[in-house]
Amino acid sequence: MPLLWVLREQLGMTGTKFGCGIAQCGACTVHIDGQAVRSCSYPASAVKAQRITTIEGLSKDGNHPLQKAWIELDVPQCGYCQSGQIMAAASLLKRKPKPTDKDIDEAMTNVCRCGAYQRIRAAIHLAAQTGKEVGSVIHMVDAGSSSMAQSKLA
C-alpha cells in the first residue's frame, strides 16, 4: 500500500493530496527524514524508523515561514497542489537556505495546473529572507510498526 493512503485513510492526514498516482505531479509530497518524497508511489512498508512529516506537521499553527509567504503573496489559486508545493519548498530551503532561481527551478518539479510558478518562486524567496524555522519537523508518524497507525508529536 502506498504511504499516501496510510496517511490519508488510516491516520486522517488529508492535507497530503492524491493527484496522479504515478509520482509525477507532486501533490502527495511529504518528507521522509527531511527529504521530499512522492508518497503516492512510496510503499508504506519501506518506511521503518524514519520521520515522516506532512503538511499538517510543518508548523503547529500554520505559521511556518513558507505558509506565511504563500498567503502574503496569494500563491494558491485552486490550492490543490499547494501542500505538495510547500513541502517541496521546505525540503529545498532546508538544503539551501538562500536558493537562487536556478536552485528553485531544479528543485521544484511539482505540477501546478493553475500556473502559479512565478508566485511560488517569489514565495520561496520571501520565506528564505524572513524564515528561521524552515524545514523544521514538528509532527511525525512513528513508522516502526507495520500498521503505521501511531502518530506522535515531536
Image (cartoon, rainbow, N blue to C red):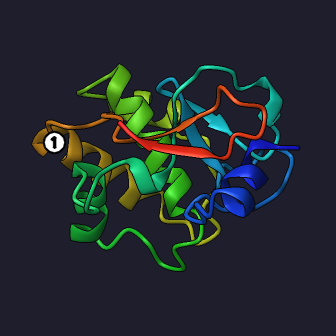
Query: How packed is label 1: few (under 14 Cα within 10 Å), some, or many (20 or more)?
Result: some
Nearer to the camera, 117 or 5: 5
Task: Confirm whether residue 42 shows in the render.
Answer: no
Task: Confirm whether residue 141 shows in the render.
Answer: yes
Left or right: 52 as drawn, with respect to 152: right
According to the image, label 1 marks what residue? 131
Locate residue 109: give its quadrant.
Answer: top right
Tell me the amino acid under the disc marked 1. Gly
Quadrant showing the C terminus: top left
User: x and y percent of residue 2 in the render?
Assistant: 83, 43
User: x and y percent of residue 58 in the render?
Assistant: 37, 48
Q: Residue at x 78, y 24 (%)?
A: 46
Task: Give the secondary structure at mark 1.
Answer: loop
Q: Residue at x 66, y 49 (%)?
A: 26
- Above or below, 49 against 149 in this view is above
User: x and y percent of residue 88 in the render?
Assistant: 50, 41
Locate residue 94: give its quadrant.
Answer: top left
- Above or below, 102 against 20 in this view is above
Nearer to the camera, 97 or 21: 21
Nearer to the camera, 105 or 154: 154
- Above or below, 9 against 59 in this view is below
